Each structure stands twice: as structure tokens, then as C-alpha cells.
Amino acid sequence: GSTVRALVQQGVENGLVPNADMEAMGYDPRYFTGLLDGYLHWEMAWFREVIQNARDAIGPNAPDGPRTIDIVCRIESYTDVDGVTVDAMRVECADDGNGMDEPTLRNAFLMFGGSMKPPGGFGGFGDAKGLIILPWLGYEIHTSDLVARGRHNRFRIEQARERRSGTRVTVWMPVSKATTPENAIAFIERCNLPEIRILVNGKTVRATLAAKAEHRIQQF
């Protein structure tokens, strides 16, 4: 009756159960708030993880093209899945790879465990997704003709209005606890990925430190 509906609505408002049109991962959302504690410097590690994923996405099987990773960081007004509007740091990473179908999208970002990294890829998706999307105010993953949007353990997958080549991952971080374009530049300067062009807020950033082939992605 009305009491049950009120309790369910209270759970939705507190982020403990999904909205009717959203799916939920099998984790209490309070779990995600502690994910950053395992990183020495998560502000750079965020870029490490998304650049690793983007680099693998535009590997030898990607379409012919410029092989570009485009990173954007800017402060903007953001309205989350519960209708709350705040100022947030928008941080996104886009690649021009092949994109993902829905099963790959779910495995790569929307469930824990396992990795679909190809041979020769860097790292794995298992831990990365915990840092890339889950601790933040909200996230959006646009890949091929799909868009996944959510916050913490709640998400929905929809058909995109426009199809895109590759994948764009966007998160909205609290302004008081956000990474910055300076962190992106500092990380990229420590990488050695000569086959890929990386932009930060529209400007090309290149490595300034010599990196050994086996250490092409700097660790943090």
C-alpha cells in the first residue's frame, strides 16, 4: 500500500534502490565512496586508467584514422539522476576506436570482475571501472549507438540520439574533490605513446620524459 510505496521512494531518494527505470549493481552505494583510498595519487590515476582503455580501443583493429584521445576538463552545472543540480567538474575522455556493443559495455563498465582486454593491452577493466565512473556525482558512457548514464550503483542504458565512432566516457566530480587538466597534462608528459595524439582541452600534449617501451604507461 501507501506505506510500502513511501519506503521504496525513500530508498530511491537515499540511493539504496534503483529508480523504476534504472538497473542496479549488486553493491551498496556507500561502498563506492571509499574507492579512492586505494590510490596513491588518484587525480593522475584517473587519467592513467581512461588513457589505457582508450589506447587499447584504438589498437591495431581500430578504423583507419588519426588515432586520437581527446580529454576535456571544465566546470559546469550538473543535474544528477535524482534531479539535484550542483556545480561540478566535467571530465571526459573520448577515443576514435571501434566502440562497444551492449554486452561489452556492461562487462567493461557496469559489472565487477573480469577483463576483456586484448592481448598486449594495459591493465584490466576490473579495478579501473571502480575509479573511472563509480565514486562520482554521475557518469555517461556514449559508445556506438548506446548511452549508459548513472550514479554509483544505479544506471540505465538507452539508444543514443546520434551514433559515434569510438567511446566517450564522461564523469562529473564534486568541485571540491576533482582532478584537473593540469593533472592530465602532468600524466601524459610521463607517457610514451608516440602512435597516438592526445589532446587536453583542445591542445596537443606530448611526452617530455623518455620512457622505456615496457613502461609506456606511467604508474601512480
Image (cartoon, rainbow, N blue to C red):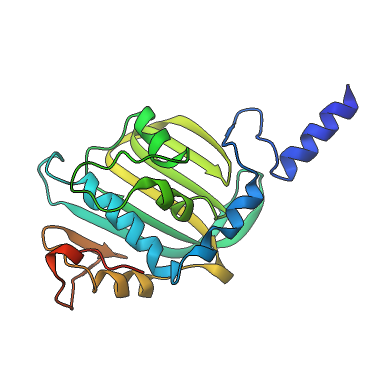
Query: Is 104 situated above or below 91?
Result: above
Question: Can residue 104 be seen in the rendering of this structure?
Answer: yes
Residue sitting nearer the eye, 159 or 131 = 131
x 61%, y 28%: residue: 21
Q: Residue furthest bottom?
A: 209
| Residue 5, horizontal then vertical, whole percent | 82, 28
x 27%, y 50%: residue: 54
User: Where's the C terminus, which quadrant?
Assistant: bottom left
| Residue 15, horizontal then vertical, whole percent | 69, 44
Q: Is residue 105 left or right of residue 164?
A: right
Query: Is 99 situated above or below 199?
Result: above
Report which quarter residue 1 is drawn in: top right
Count of numbered badges drawn on the protein = 0
| Residue 192, horizontal then vertical, whole percent | 17, 67
Q: Is residue 193 left or right of residue 217?
A: left
Q: Is residue 71 left or right of residue 212?
A: right
Question: Can residue 96 be seen in the rendering of this structure?
Answer: no
| Residue 177, horizontal then vertical, whole percent | 55, 69
Query: Is 193 situated above or below 209?
Result: above
Residue sitting nearer the eye, 163 or 20 = 20
Q: Residue furthest top?
A: 1
Query: Is 130 situated above or below 116?
Result: below
